[in-house]
Image: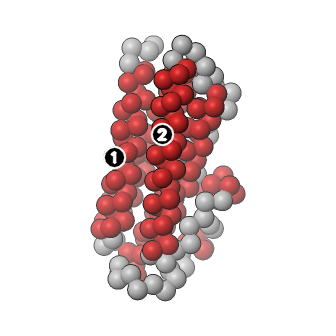
Amino acid sequence: MAKAETDKVPNKTRNDTPSNGKTVSINVLQAVLTDIIDLTNATRQAHWNVKGSHFYGLHKMFETFYTMLNEQTDELAERAVQLGGIPDGTTQAVGAQTRIKPYDAKILDGLDHCSALADRYAQMAQALREGIDTTDEAGDADTSDLLTQVSREVDKALWMIEAHLQGKN
């Protein structure tokens, strides 16, 4: 969604979140939605292409993570709609708006995938925490709470990914 589109007054809704809170939250939700879709795709890329002695465990773990991220994507998009927004998860929007650094599609080694994903999960976690503060300050405790929920899930996945990197040079 282009910047001008996200700055418009939200669609009419009976949700009593203050108007400014709705606008701020819709913008935060769109940014986080874009990033989490990109992170889901990077995780799926790792799942498809992981190789090495850790193959089976990482393959299953990555599948668990992209499934979790996909569920959170739906929650984020639905919250934007509840506030009167129109979330945009199209390939074009994600490609143009993601704040997650590009994923190297040629990575094969399992621990290299873990390292690449750890960087991106940490980036996602930071964006979520910034969104928590922004939506809370805007008076939208419900969106802040949702972002907190997603943040806990992303932090847990990051912890599990980083556990594979312990002792790696």
Question: How far across and down, in percent of the image, does residue 69 sit?
Answer: 48, 47
Residue 139, compared with residue 126, is above or below; it is: below
Judging depth in this view, the residue of 60 and 118 nearest the camera is 60
Residue 16, compared with residue 130, is above or below; it is: below
Left or right relative to 22: residue 35: right
- Identify which residue is drawn at 40% across, 27% down: 162
Q: What kind of residue is marked 2?
A: Phe
- Identify which residue is drawn at 46% across, 46% down: 68
Left or right relative to 60: residue 122: left
Residue, disc 2: 65
Q: Is residue 24 visible?
A: yes
Question: How far across and down, in percent of the image, does residue 138 sit?
Answer: 34, 71
- Identify which residue is drawn at 58% across, 15% down: 52
Disc 2 packing (10 Å; few <14; some 14–19; many ≥20)? many
Q: Are marks 1 and 2 in contact (CB under 8 Å)?
A: no
Left or right relative to 35: residue 158: left
Circle on res. 152: 1
Label 1 residue SS:
helix
Q: What kind of residue is marked 1?
A: Arg
Label 2 residue SS:
helix
Which callout, 1 or 2, points at the residue further toward the start of the chain? Answer: 2
Question: How far across and down, in percent of the image, does residue 126 sit?
Answer: 40, 47
